[in-house]
């Protein structure tokens, strides 16, 4: 379903209809949300439409600010939109939008360069591009991919690069230098495994290689680099469990996570029970690491607003002492920006 910002009745239906009993745990929409990870559009053609839709939708859900990011574009889609376009949007709506960048420029370089083929010239070119991003006013580097499943033929292709790729390690050093976080898209693969049957097919490989050990090497490489593991709660490998996330956060103080949910993720590891209440294990994890999570709905604003609605439901459904931290307070400490 494509989202038309002129269809106010659709907005009203989605943001006023109760999601489930758990959504009423707090007064509806009273806690403001600073959404740390969204996308204007899937492509450049609907970029302006997506920004208009964001301006229309955000007030209905009390989303005060959002950080816009380019998806982790592959080489064939390099530069569909990125730092220049997102900086312009943020300047026009400085109270509403901030941005990250690098998904349009750094990610294609990582995906196109095997780890053992990183020359001094490639490293220098990558570092120059990352420095350019840092100087644009971006609040972080994103979205880059270590393990990104294909979303289907004709859409986003499969992407995979080890999290300890030399270019990822170099980027972590630049993140530490500028105090900017690195936003990483990575399906959890704690052991070699066949590709999940429900998502197998020609756009994806038959097998997956373990990536958690390499992820920990990235986290250990420069402890001053803040690594934001995107999309907690939206799990396609079936392996990003609460115990796995907790164990990694216990070992790595520079690991942070954004929370996302929609119908396509594995219910087993999603934050919601079937009745819409938030799972006790999730609440316990948020309480154990209250400074390490933020909302990052991954909403594409040129599409139906399911993801950002689910983010609203989560903030409405968690205990009131946690909701402000995760809903808006943590973002300013993790990203390079003042609290808005």
Image: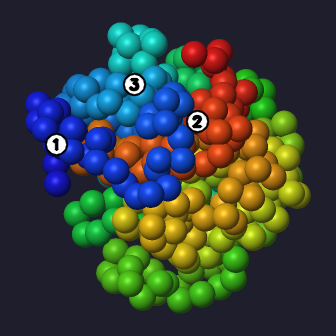
**Relative to 218, is 92 above or below?**
above
Q: Quadrant of residue 337?
A: top right
Which residue does the image show at 35% across and 25% down from the upper left? 59
Q: Quadrant of residue 263?
A: bottom left
Numbered badge on residue 327: 2
Which quadrant of the figure contains the N terminus?
A: bottom left
Report whether residue 61 is seen. yes
Badges 1 and 2: C-beta atoms under 8 Å apart? Answer: no
Q: Nearer the viewer, mark 1 or mark 3?
A: 1
Q: Position of residue 304 (x, y in %)?
A: 24, 48
Measured Cα–Cα span from mark 1 to mark 3: 27 Å
Which residue does the image show at 45% across and 34% down from the upper left? 29
Instruction: Indicate left or right for 94 with 323 as reference.
Output: left
Q: Nearer the viewer, mark 2 or mark 3?
A: 2
Give the residue number, with chain letter if any, for mark 3: 86
Which residue does the image show at 32% across and 81% down from the upper left? 202
**Relative to 50, is 260 above or below?**
below
Give the residue number, with chain letter if any, for mark 1: 10
**Relative to 137, is 119 above or below?**
below
Q: Position of residue 93 (x, y in %)?
A: 38, 13
Which residue does the image show at 65% across and 46% down from the upper left? 319
């Amino acid at each position: 379903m494509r989202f038309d910002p002129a269809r106010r009745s659709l907005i009203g239906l989605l943001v006023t209809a109760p999601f489930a009993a758990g959504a009423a745990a707090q007064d509806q929409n009273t806690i403001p949300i600073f959404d740390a990870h969204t996308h204007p559009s899937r492509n450049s053609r609907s970029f302006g439409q997506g920004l208009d839709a964001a301006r229309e939708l955000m007030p209905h859900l009390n989303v005060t600010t959002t950080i816009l990011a380019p998806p982790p574009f592959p080489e064939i889609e390099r530069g569909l939109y990125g730092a220049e376009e997102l900086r312009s949007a943020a300047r026009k709506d400085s109270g509403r939008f901030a941005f990250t960048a690098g998904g349009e420029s750094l990610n294609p370089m990582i995906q196109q360069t095997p780890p053992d083929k990183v020359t001094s010239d490639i490293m220098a070119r990558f570092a120059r591009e990352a420095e350019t991003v840092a100087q644009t006013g971006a609040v972080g580097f994103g979205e880059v991919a270590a393990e990104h499943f294909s979303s289907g033929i004709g859409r986003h292709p499969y992407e995979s690069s080890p999290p300890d790729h030399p270019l990822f390690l170099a980027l972590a050093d630049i993140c530490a230098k500028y105090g900017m976080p690195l936003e990483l898209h990575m399906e959890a693969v704690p052991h070699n495994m066949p590709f999940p049957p429900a998502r197998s097919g020609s756009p994806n490989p038959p097998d997956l290689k373990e990536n958690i050990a390499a992820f920990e090497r990235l986290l250990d490489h420069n402890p001053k680099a803040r690594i934001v593991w995107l999309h907690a709660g939206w799990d396609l490998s079936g392996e990003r469990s609460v115990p796995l996330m907790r164990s990694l956060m216990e070992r790595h103080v520079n690991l942070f996570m954004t929370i996302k949910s929609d119908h396509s993720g594995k219910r087993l590891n999603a934050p919601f029970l079937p009745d819409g209440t938030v799972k006790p294990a999730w609440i316990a994890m948020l309480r154990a690491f209250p400074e390490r999570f933020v909302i990052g709905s991954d909403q594409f604003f040129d599409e139906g607003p399911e993801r950002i609605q689910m983010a609203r439901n989560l903030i409405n459904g968690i205990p009131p002492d946690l909701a402000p931290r995760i809903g808006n307070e943590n973002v300013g400490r993790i990203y390079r920006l003042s609290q808005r």
